[in-house]
Image: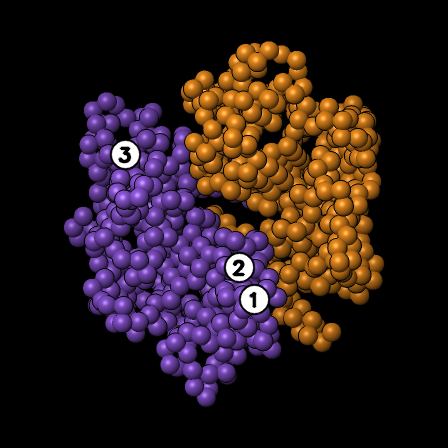
Chain colours: A orange, B purple
Amino acid sequence: MTGNSPASEVVLEVADLTVGFPSDDGLVQAVRGVSYGVRRGEVLGIVGESGAGKSVTSLAVMGLLPRSAQVSGSVRFRGRQLLGAADAELNTVRGRNISMIFQDPMTSLNPVYSIGFQVAEAIRAHHSVSKAAARNRAAELLELVHIPNPRQRLDSYPHELSGGMRQRVVIAIAMANDPDVIIADEPTTALDVTVQAQIMESLQTAQQQTGAAMVLITHDLGVIAGQADRVLVMYAGKLVEVGTAEDVFYTPRMPYTVGLLGSVPQLDRPGTRLISIPGAPPSVLHLPAGCPFAPRCPLVVARCTEKEPVLEPTTGPEHLAACHRSAALVGAAPGDVFDASASAVVESGRDA
Amino acid sequence: MSAPAWRTDGASRGGSGPIVAARNLVKHFPVRSSGLLRRQRGVVHAVCDVSFDLADGETLGLVGESGCGKSTLARLVLNLIEATSGQVCYDGTDLTTLSSKQMRGLRRDLQIVFQDPYASLDPRMPVNEIIAEPLRIHGRFDAAGRTQVRDLLRTVGLEPEHGNRFPHEFSGGQRQRIGVARALALRPKVLVLDEPVSALDVSIQAGVLNLLDELQSELGLAYLFVSHDLSVVRHIADRIAVMYLGRIVETGPADALFDGPAHPYTQALISAIPLPDPRRQRVRERITVVGDVPSPADPPSGCRFRTRCPTFAAVLGEAERRRCVDEVPELVDRGQGHPVACHYAEPKSLI
């Protein structure tokens, strides 16, 4: 999808990334052949439910997976292969060119150092500047993410700050070295809605100030709708739909995306019955043959359980879906797809 | 707050009086020093002067951010913690005056479903036993008990054959259904749902919400639905009360509250919720509040929201602000059609 755009534009390119974790019961296939590219200044949203492999994908990009993980494929930053690179080499990229924001600000800061020290540390790790200069820059960064009285705050410790403030500090650290890519993994999940809105604003500031590409991982479709230029939908370790935000939200071509969109209660549409996707995500330990969504899919046909669908263009060359039945979704509302056939699915499930 | 105008609101729905009525509920938690004597150093004002009615068969949504006192209020309603002052009347009986023995009989009618389905089920009990436990405690597990448990499992959409399994064998959504089945075992009239879907993925959450909807129409339950998620509350509740730092700041029928939120905090909450619709989400008017919730151990004087209020900061003049600082705004209808606790309430259309 990004292969035909100029190589200089794509800053991070992930190709056929596969991650498995050996366990006593066999190989846990957390990520199965994920490919994407992020262009400079673009926000790429990755959405999916817990266990879909969203976080593992980004940890693999950062080279932060445990040693036991079996990783294959390629992760290229500006043409440089990161997968399998030595730690020393990765350290010149991590935090400098690609930085990451984790979900829980309570655990991603070091409790025994002041926040000024931690922001300055991130700067000094990649630039040889004096302590005083780094501290000044740290104060500027804190101001950019809207922390009041940044100079006084430099000497505060993480426990003295609220969750929202801590997450801002993490964002300040992430943008300290003008990265080219910021990976934000559920940056607002642990926060209250009003604080969440503030943090999303800070993130936008960070992204605009640095001109970085952003990979925004979240389970919240609302956040994706407001922020992302392009969206990847993940299910059971695979990409099942890829497209612009408008493609994915207005003309979804994968039943899982349709169900996901229909299951969110919407403020402006009260009283509509929510779609509940029957069943639960499959265990990535023993994946069924064929499409991983087939056991829960109302449109399932014999082919779905035989052959796993690949990503194919649907409404446009950039809008891809991995579904044998995507043509059946043209013009269908979520309620038509799921409710009418929901009981039928339960019945056929029992027969099997 | 004497005789708020909306008291009749709940009563008019069912045609009879409210099934649960809370009046001027207050809960203060002491803050003690860490020394040997554990002297009291202050109080956390968790719930301050809260009144509401819950009618038969109705859902009252209680929303607010973490630390606003909504869970404390839910527990006060069930008399699980003792109120500092105020009353909770269930069917005309004041629960706060009852002994724990007298309370026990009433617990049949008032049940709770907790937030975390991983922590609220005993991992060493099979599901059948978990659901039968309330029946046994209240001496109602008789010859038909087993069938009753099977029926309950079926009611919440689980296979009765799975009753011999243990909680760890179920997914989060299924466990929450078990929690609901346990709460329903004694055929309660009121169900307090404390963030029942917050720990679940959206597609699973939808199933539990639909189940709660169906149960209500079948069994005529009254729900007190506590949540931080406005879109979930909007979906399920008939009436909504918005809490901030221990006080209800705005309450009214769900439609009225969302069509014309009048309290700046409600407006900020509504506008902070991202709509899963890219075109509309990107052109929406945003009302952002600054900072974080102040400590409930030392709440601001007057209006508790004034420290973060965009109206207070940008619109009001010096004299008007004085009123916010000095005078606690009462929760009354100031011409918005529903009660709002703001001196300068003004309805806004945000969706």
Label 1: chain letter: B
Q: Residue at x 50, y 83 (%)?
A: B146
**A202 left or right of B266 in image:** right
**Mark 3 closeness class: few <14, some 14–19, many ≥20 residues within 10 Å:** some
The one of A288 and A60 positioned closer to us in this rendering: A60
Q: Quadrant of residue B292?
A: top left
Identify the residue under disc 3. B300
Number of the label disc, if any, that sits on residue B211: none
**Mark 1 closeness class: few <14, some 14–19, many ≥20 residues within 10 Å:** many
Identify the residue under disc 2. B118
Identify the residue under disc 1. B167
Disc 3 marks which amino acid?
A: Pro
Q: Outermost residue, left direction? A: B2
**Mark sitting earlier along the chain (1/3):** 1
Say which element carries label 2: loop
Q: Residue at x 19, y 35 (%)?
A: B327
Image depth: mark 3 or mark 2 in front? 2
Res A81 visible: yes
**Mark 2 closeness class: few <14, some 14–19, many ≥20 residues within 10 Å:** some
In the rendering, at what x and y percent does residue B305 appear?
A: 31, 36
**A306 left or right of A207 in image:** right
Disc 2 marks which amino acid?
A: Tyr
Q: Outermost residue, front direction? A: B36
**B276 left or right of A94 in image:** left
The one of A347 and A113 positioned closer to us in this rendering: A113
